[in-house]
Amino acid sequence: MFRRIDDFVTIWTEELKKTREVLARVPAAALKAPGAPHRDLGRLGWHLLETCVELPSHLGLAVPGPKIANGFIAEPVPGDPAAIDAAYGVSATALAELVKRWNDAELEAVVEMYGERWTKGYALFALVVHQAHHRGQMALLLRQAGVQPTDVYGPTREGWAKYGLEAPAV
């Protein structure tokens, strides 16, 4: 849970960069991987944007982005991964700027979230870990689509070479 605005902004800014690195890896040909009935790479990317707009609305923040209806983006997933990344970048950056207008005490305010009562600080924490969760899913789907995922919290199998090391045996 966040108790300081500066802590959220610092972490969110880093997480935003990591998310955009993952989104930048998605080739147009892999947007529909793995396919129905599962969320594909395009839908997961769109969902990251969706939560940047939808969740903060419960906190009184009007994050610019696509129209949300019944908790979901009303528009279909674009066929261009760059469009998903660009829209995510705008909304995620705007979210940090809106939170900067709060003071630390605002993070202790309790709001109704998905049938529960959360502090605003906890809701922002949930948003951060939610993004990390779906980035992990996207990394797996990228690998399955033949695309090397990015190093996020540590090196990928291929990323060890940047450190002059061999990947650990699995």
Image: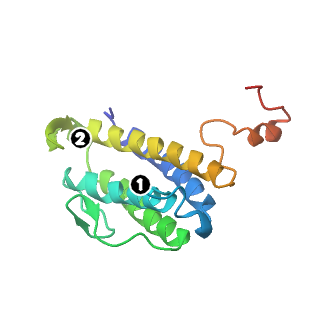
**Image check: 43 left or right of 156?**
left
Which comes sooner in the sequence, label 2 or label 1? Answer: 1
Query: Dot 1: few (<14), some (14–19), or many (≥20) neighbours within 10 Å?
Result: few
In the picture, the disc for residue 113 is none
Q: Residue at x 76, y 27 (%)?
A: 168
Tell me: residue 152, above or below residue 21: above
Front residue of 141 and 66:
141
Q: Which is nearer the eye, 49 or 123?
A: 49
Percent coordinates x, y for residue 37 in the rendering: 41, 54
Q: How many marks?
A: 2
Percent coordinates x, y for residue 105 in the rendering: 22, 37
Can you say whether 129 is above or below 62 in the image? above
In the rendered image, the residue lying farthest to the front is 37
Query: How far across and down, in percent of the image, does residue 26 sit?
Result: 59, 61
Q: Is residue 166 left or right of residue 170?
A: right
Mark 2 surroundings within 10 Å by alpha-carbon count, few (fewer than 14), some (14 through 19), many (20 or more): many
- Which quadrant would the N terminus be assigned to in this image? top left
> Which label is found at residue 120?
2
Inter-mark Cα distance, 2 to 1: 33 Å
Q: Give the residue drawn at x 37%, y 61%.
A: 94
Answer with the quarter of the image where residue 129 lies: top left
When the figure is inspected, residue 65 is found, relative to residue 61, above or below; the finding is below
The disc placed on residue 37 is 1
Q: Residue at x 68, y 55 (%)?
A: 147
The amino acid pointed to by label 1 is Pro
- Quadrant the C terminus occupies: top right
